[in-house]
Amino acid sequence: MISKQMKEFVANGSAIRAMFEEGKEMAAIYGAENVCDFSLGNPNLPPPDMVKEAIIQILDQEDPTDLHGYMSNSGFLDVREQIAQSINRKYNTSFSNENIIMTVGAAGGLNVVFKTLLDPGDQVMTFAPYFGEYRNYSISFNADFAVVPASIPSFQPNLPEFERMLGPTTKIVMLNTPNNPTGVVYTEETIAGLAEILYRKQEEFGTNIYLVSDEPYRELVYGDIEVPYVTKYYDNTIVVDSYSKSLSLPGERIGYLVIPDAAADSGMILAAANIATRLLGYVNAPSLMQKTVAKCLDAKVDIEYYDRNRQALYNGLTSMGYECTYPDGAFYLWVKSPIEDDGEFVKMAKKYQILLVPGTFFGCPGYARIAYCVLPRTIEVALPKFQALMEEIKEKTL
Amino acid sequence: MISKQMKEFVANGSAIRAMFEEGKEMAAIYGAENVCDFSLGNPNLPPPDMVKEAIIQILDQEDPTDLHGYMSNSGFLDVREQIAQSINRKYNTSFSNENIIMTVGAAGGLNVVFKTLLDPGDQVMTFAPYFGEYRNYSISFNADFAVVPASIPSFQPNLPEFERMLGPTTKIVMLNTPNNPTGVVYTEETIAGLAEILYRKQEEFGTNIYLVSDEPYRELVYGDIEVPYVTKYYDNTIVVDSYSKSLSLPGERIGYLVIPDAAADSGMILAAANIATRLLGYVNAPSLMQKTVAKCLDAKVDIEYYDRNRQALYNGLTSMGYECTYPDGAFYLWVKSPIEDDGEFVKMAKKYQILLVPGTFFGCPGYARIAYCVLPRTIEVALPKFQALMEEIKEKTL
């Protein structure tokens, strides 16, 4: 009795759930301390202490009726202005509160953008490997979904292929940098090249193509890596951001959209996005959390922790002969499957109580994703297992 | 460049916004204290003190990584269990955590239900006067929307008309009790009669028709009025509830669905609804607020306050000759327009700095809604204005 579309999602959903539930079953058999679950991109660091302090301060100082009440669907004006100014300070942009729409996390923001822009049959294009929800959201809005094959081994967007594939129905190009699942940060050269192609193709087709930059990992970069701010390279950019990773608040569902004045039809898009939040049933982003993140705009989780995990895993695995993409951001390590079939590789890893996600899930077979938002102890336990796994593979493929 | 559907919403949206913005303009001209804005159904009472205490207690006691982290899309298990048990205690039902899905408010919950159940072309039916978002959500999901004309003067659902209109494509019947905009609580006789018709028609059509009971005002009832719990009368019922009104937390976006085991295909619906929360981008209801409402299940805003407003307005207006529907719940008074054209009546009221919403907005011309979630002072200021308005109308219609 459920809708036809949901029937398919339920069928696929159970396959994914089954994979994740294996972790629980394994823990029951082998003991939780012996299972190395690298499958979930769920922050394992607490939010900065400042978050709790901010919440309590807000509860003490603000009028509770206003604090927990309705505001404009786009969010509290002061919060939006503070976020705009914070972006301006960091990236030398010139946004105001009018360019910001507070959203129920980045996922909520993406739905607002898709609802606002997409007619059935419009095309959404992205680059392999990609976050699987882009595909699901596209199906949900009856859009056509196209994937540009990966550029190996850089895992920067494959620009020649991209240019070839763009067409007159392409309405949205999804960008995700720092990237899930590779941890790769797209370079300035990539972004500029991509913008140049888009400008040219817009001209050719007489259309507007919106570059939707999904950036929940923007604050999670290592060393002195810079993540170019995409609006500076391409006018028709919409930025989707969230505090799920930078402040470890994924359950609170708080993020925002940046819709620049420079984007074509920006006034109409802003008006429609404001209504889309209502129409999708969010109405507005959770009010207390809006006020909270506004007080924590310069705070960040302990990124050194993720960095130590990153180094331990990357160095450990490469020394064993695994081919890994060096991750400049996010908390994922992208490893080449030592055998052709990534599904088989992930299956073999399970025998060692290591849980990975096959690259096929991200539209990029032959690889696997290791989420290192885990206890350092998990990595210590995992390394000898990875070693044994590699030895088994070498033996078999001799 | 926005989607065709959103273009229409933006066009209609500006009409509604224009109405609400008149209030601000009036305040600038006449002074805020002289403008009687009865247009918005926005709780003006603070949440019970318990809410703040609960938040601080949770922040002090719970592990912050878990508290603000992802959980099952359906919500924290303990929260869902506590809500189920609270419903069981109040209504002698037998739900468990498995029947509860936490949602981003009632609006989010309704979107989950619509996304889960509706194929394009399915029919959603409701009873005039109705909350306008039902229509918008139906359009959003490409469903057919049908309205059963009002039963005057009771404003209980018009059951003979309902029976006549139900058809083989009817998938969802929306019920809203206590009702927005009338304040009427549907009686047990109504609910039982409605259930009897639905059972008969399901049999006749060989379909399942889901009764979706939207109940954000359930806790806002006056005197010893009882609001029948709909799942007890009809198996294929899905309850949509929120804490926006009972705890004055509309900005926090926290509510839940009840999907009973007795509903046809309940297992499939639960699985699909769990995925729909992800697909719509909510992912899960805001985590801190989930924990907070679970600690406040027996708390409620100061309903005596709304009751005093109710009495003052009802008694005041009826003594002047206005025909009002006596409201047993919610914070709305439904008044018959003393002239045929409710749009004209609302326009005349504006000359007295009184802001109402015309019944036409709720699919029921000839009436107007007065939201009395306002300061008592606003009602004091308004009554002489209503008197003068009635005198002007009487003079004109002599």
Image (cartoon, coloured by chain):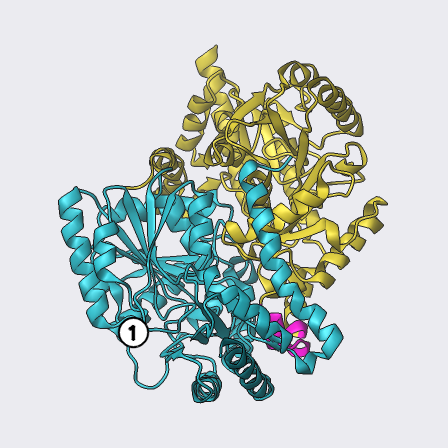
Chain colours: A yellow, B cyan
Q: Give the residue at the far front of this rendering.
A: B398
Which image quarter: residue B27? bottom right
**Can you say which quadrant of the picture contains the N terminus of chain A?**
top left
Q: Residue B276: within the magenta?
A: no
Task: From the image, give the main secondary structure of the stretch colored magenta.
Answer: helix
Give B392 or B225, whichever is nearer the viewer.
B392
Q: Position of residue A26 (x, y in %)?
A: 37, 41
Q: Nearer the viewer, residue B176 or B151?
A: B151
In the displayed structure, B72 sits above or below B169; it is below
Query: Does residue A61 belong to the magenta stretch?
Result: yes
Residue at 58% in and 68% down = B347
> For the magenta stretch, what is the residue range?
A57-69
Residue placed at 48% from the left, 41% from the top?
Answer: A37
Measuring from the top left, give residue A205's x and y in whole percent. 68, 19
Q: Position of residue A92 (x, y in %)?
A: 86, 45
Q: Position of residue B1 (x, y in %)?
A: 65, 34
Q: Which residue is mark 1?
A: B227
Give the residue type that dot 1 points to.
Val
Residue B39 versus residue A258 in the image, above or below: below
Q: Is residue A247 left or right of residue B316?
A: right
